Image (spheres, helix red, strand yellow):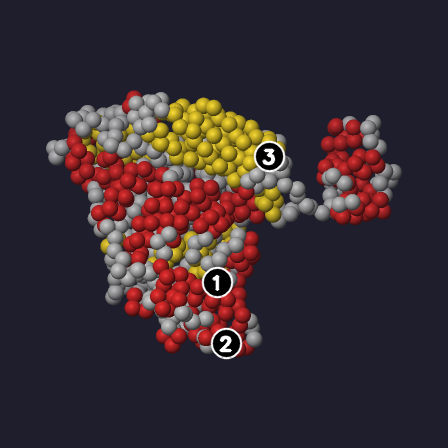
Amino acid sequence: MTDTLTPAAANGGATVADLTLEEKASLTSGASFWTTKAIDRVGIPSIMLTDGPHGVRKQRAGADHLGIGDSVPATCFPPAVALGSSFDPELLERVGVALGQESLAEDVGVLLGPGINIKRSPLCGRNFEYLSEDPIVSGVMGAALVRGLQSQGVGASLKHFAANNQEADRMRVSADIDPRPLREIYLRGFQRVVQDAQPWTVMCSYNRLNGVYTSEDPWLLTTVLRDEWGFEGLVVSDWGAVNERVTGLVAGLDLEMPASGGRTDAQLVDAVRSGDLDESALDLAAQRNLDLVRKVVAGARPDASYDAAAHHALAREVAAASIVLLRNEGGALPLDPGASVAVVGELARTPRYQGAGSSLINPTKLDDALTEIRAIAGDDVPFAAGYALDGTADAALADEAVAAASATGTVLLFLGVPAELESEGFDRDDIELPAPQLELAERVVAANPNTVVVLSNGGVVRLPFADRVSAILEGWLLGQAGGGAVADVLYGRVNPSGRLAESIPNRLEDSPAFLDFPGEHSHVRYGEGLFVGYRWYDARAIDVAFPFGHGLSYTTFGYSDASAEATADGIVVRVSVTNTGDRDGAEVVQVYSALPGSGVVRAPRELKGFAKVFVPAGESRVAEVHVRRDDLAYWDTRADAWVVEGGAYELSIGASSRDLREVVSVEVEGDEVQVPLTMDSSIGELVEHPVAGPIVRQAMGGEGSFMADPAMFKMLASFPIGRLSTFPGSPMGRDDVEQLLQAANAGA
Ligand code: BGC
């Protein structure tokens, strides 16, 4: 492919006007599994798009034709589940840069990621590939990755657009979502990445959204994505997501992947010839493909290479920054290198470091925790496998592990979810660790309560032993250098600073989507509405094992002097963070908003911004969090628009959604909502209206009338004015009301 990626093609280049109808159609679908079509006649080269997202998965020539076979070695960075927990956009930008360098070295023009779908249910089989249950975290972190990648001249593909929150029936299921949760939870992160980072491509998802395939939804792909958000790039289908090619193209789908053998290109040509498809729609899609090719050609560097050792080191740094220290009783961690330890659990020796499916990277190198622990604490650190990864119970392995646990100072117990239970393509049945591991954990803790649990899992797991062990490291899936990162954190070479980007519930039954996940008969109703993740647990006052935003450090942080200042484009929150311990460390300051007395349904707390601040031991730093005005807005279903409700916003600043340290209040001026008054408008609504209000009050008798009696007013406030006007003796007749409505709607 590099031969054809010449700067001449990038600069000179053909235009749509140079192409025949057939050529235009052919440009809008793939040539193979991973490449687009070249048009040699006019010098348009082919480009390569490949997975993604946490490494470059470029298939070797001659590998299988399903797209999941052997791929060239590439750095396996931590998957999104870990990246999200770092709460560190700058770090993600650096990962993006490294991914860009590796893509260039492999002649890859577009890397298929990041995936930023919301983790609606802990059961989603692909949660390891997504960042968070919160749209602000997903959006901020997703934008950082895109920025880094594209700074290298390689395109991102923001996926899976949209509402692809489960794997069950993913190619057909309709995610049935009300407008507010759709906008405020499921689209908000996509909107942010598009507006902040302009990904070169957006990948539509497989599923339907409110009954319409996203690959052929003009509202989603054009009205929202382009007209409202200003997306300037190309929309590519998820691999095999196209249902009806012509319908898709008209809706705004520019590139079908992978190849369809020319079959659907012919459909486009026929549709233009028969007059069913306006040729200008095809021209537009072809133009967007040409634009993408030009960007890729301009970014290509045929002589590019990368420093695999440096990228491995970066992968280790990122992994360590993503580990979440969930619990640390009595300062059990960090360990002294000379401390007596025993390592228990097959996962310490055979790491689980990424999820299965299209994102499976062939790593350049693979570290395991056991070797890395021994490198610090000595080759004589005992090890017992304890269980087999295939989930079969093995009494001998367990007995041996319990014996090792009894004979040591600290047990480092590695537990996790085996690869075959978590993958793209299907969901999990539960959030349990395998039974043999849970049994082993009970026996090990009974034998030695000084047990430190290290977890490897792509989706959250239930932790029944949580309050009986001395420490827990949530290691998620940490990529190829995760073993070293775990050792770094265990021995205090790195002070943990990861925070939970998703809540860990006590039971699956407590989770928000429990009752209607994954739906039935190809429909899934998002019945929990806005109440996803911590929004649900907080609104229902449900205890969780570990709340959203939680994560400990080997030092402690104090918060003081919080302030908030309203600016033209939002609110600036400042708080002084003091490192009150004796180690340098980083704190993730989180800002949650509430609006007491709000006229719309809201979660008790909504994350509006965060900042990761490094604070040396004994010192203080001011953390500054910018809350965007846009992020204060709710989606108003009457006006079909974002609206900032006016009022005194309460901003809680803290170390997790349930560890709030400071509260500041700030008055925010609201947007005017233009909702036309009609005969169906209630008296309460009319009274609030700047024009109608005084007239209605006057007509209803002013002071002394029922308007002045609060109970009476409350009763009548919900009465539509049209109905009241027909009542005998009504102070306003039908004609009066009609005149009033006209005047009010005209603003006079
Ligand atoms: C996945 C995408 C991936 C594509 C190409 C699809 O099955 O959903 O995330 O980028 O395959 O491998």
**Nearest to the observer: residue 205 or residue 703:** 703
Q: Are marks 1 and 2 in contact (CB under 8 Å)?
A: no
**How far apart are labels 3 and 1 at the CA level?**
39 Å
Dot 2: what SS?
helix
Residue 483 drawn at (x, y percent): 23, 40
Is 572 on the left or on the right of 152, as rendered? right
**Nearest to the observer: residue 647 or residue 462:** 647
Q: Are marks 3 and 1 in contact (CB under 8 Å)?
A: no
Q: Which residue is mark 3?
A: 668
Q: Earlier in the sequence, mark 3 or mark 1?
A: 1
Residue 699 drawn at (x, y percent): 84, 36
**How far apart are labels 3 and 2 at the CA level?**
56 Å
The answer to whether residue 624 is seen in the rendering is: yes
**Numbered tag placed on residue 253 in the rendering:** 1
Q: Decide: few, some or many residues near mark 2? Use Cα within 10 Å; few <14, some 14-19, many ≥20.
A: some
Q: Decide: few, some or many residues near mark 3? Use Cα within 10 Å; few <14, some 14-19, many ≥20.
A: many
Where, quadrant-wise, is the C terminus in this rendering?
top right
Furthest residue toward left: 380
Residue type, label 1: Leu
Q: Residue at x 53, y 52 (%)?
A: 229
Quarter of the image for residue 440 reads top left
Q: Residue at x 60, y 40 (%)?
A: 644
Residue type, label 2: Asp
**Numbered tag placed on residue 270 in the rendering:** 2
Where, quadrant-wise, is the N terminus in this rendering?
bottom left
Is ligand 1 within 8 Å of the beta carbon of the residue shown at mark 2?
Answer: no
Residue 212 drawn at (x, y percent): 53, 58
Furthest residue toward right: 729
Residue 663 drawn at (x, y percent): 51, 26
